[in-house]
Image (cartoon, rainbow, N blue to C red):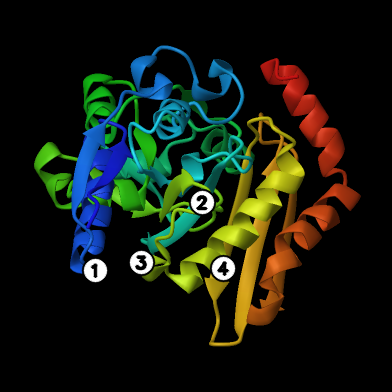
Amino acid sequence: MKTIKIGTRQSPLALWQANKVASILEAKGHPTEIVPITSEGDANLKQPIYSLGLTGVFTRSLDIALLNDQVDIAVHSLKDVPTVLPETLELIAYPERASSADILVYKSKDIFEKEHRIIATGSLRRKAFWNHKYPNDTIVDLRGNVQLRLKKLQDHADWDGAVFAFAGLDRSEILDELAEKDLHYKVIDWMIAAPSQGILGIVAKEGFDLSDINNPQCELFATVERQFLNVLEGGCTAPIGALVEKIDEENYSFKGAILSIDGQEMISIERQFKADEYLTKGREFAEECIAQGAARMIEEIKKEIGTK
């Protein structure tokens, strides 16, 4: 049987994800080889992510490796994958979803008593949600892999906390180490996750079949959330949250929102839908937001961050 070459970013988290997929594939009888590749997003840690161009800053190098047949598949945190892929590439499997939650990692428990905090994040969505709830706080930019971001939080004495994906810290096996670093964490239950946060996505050339490791429920989550993002986003980086959760075998709930960059304006939606309706629901929910003024917000965001 042919060895499947798995392309991945070189961060510890990305390598963990690639090895996770390798173990799933090998359990199904597919031999694998891990091929680490440097991404533009990993190489440039000085600029905010949204200023590096359009979407795909973490996936472009792996797309090129796929198109050049250096690798057979690429494993991603699905939230990093643009909703429009290069021609001849497609998402072929969604093997796992971990927690979709964002968490606040913080130094002192008096953080919740403060009138003004300094919070670090490199995410436009997290910044907007935080500013919406705590408009008096200061947000500073934070880039790098999970380990580097935690070190930066510790090194900056005036920073109170930083926002991370629960799945990233959990998969990196760092959650249990936070106490040793005199750090604490709390799930941010009012922040809507990035579309597909916590889901692993596999990209390959069209026709490459890995249906035997696909999780249909993860595919449902991803389809609705990414469709919502695609319709709203229009190719620009924007503060958008979207989350599908299972109610029972037939019913699912959806929460979505788009915010202005400063967080002062937010359009949000909460709906329920049937499992057999999922193929069109993301678009339907996005169009409801557009009817409430989301298109105007997107145009303002594009102007603000210089995206055409």
Residue 122 in the image: above or below residue 213: above
State the mark number for residue 285. none
Picture quarter with the C terminus: top right
Q: What residue sits 61% from the left and 77% below the top?
A: 252
Task: Residue under label 4, please give it.
Answer: 220
Please rate how many residues cluster around mark 3, counting C-alpha atoms within 10 Å: few if below 14, some from 14 to 19, many from 20: some
Estimate the x, y position of residue 102 in percent, counting from the top left. Answer: 43, 50
Task: Residue under label 1, please give it.
Answer: 28
Q: Amino acid at mark 4?
A: Leu
Q: What residue sits 86% from the left and 35% below the top?
A: 296
What is the CA distance from the residue labelled 4 to the residue labelled 2? 13 Å
What is the CA distance from the residue labelled 3 to the residue labelled 4? 15 Å
Residue 287 quadrant: bottom right
Relative horizontal placement of residue 81, taking residue 277 as reference (left or right) = left
Relative horizontal placement of residue 13, taking residue 90 as reference (left or right) = left
Mark 1 and mark 3 lie on one chain; the one further toward the N terminus is 1
Question: Regarding mark 1 in the picture, which secondary structure is present there?
Answer: loop
Relative horizontal placement of residue 294, taking residue 202 as reference (left or right) = right
Residue 11 in view = no
Residue 227 in view = yes
Observer-nearest of 129 and 7:
7
Please rate how many residues cluster around mark 2, counting C-alpha atoms within 10 Å: few if below 14, some from 14 to 19, many from 20: many
Question: Regarding mark 3 in the picture, which secondary structure is present there?
Answer: helix
Question: Regarding mark 2 in the picture, which secondary structure is present there?
Answer: strand
Estimate the x, y position of residue 81 in percent, counting from the top left. Answer: 51, 41
What is the CA distance from the residue labelled 1 to the residue labelled 2? 19 Å
Question: Regarding mark 4 in the picture, which secondary structure is present there?
Answer: helix
Task: Residue under label 2, please give it.
Answer: 91
Q: Residue furthest bottom?
A: 249
Mark 1 and mark 2 lie on one chain; the one further toward the N terminus is 1
What is the CA distance from the residue labelled 4 to the residue labelled 1? 23 Å
Q: Amino acid at mark 3?
A: Ile
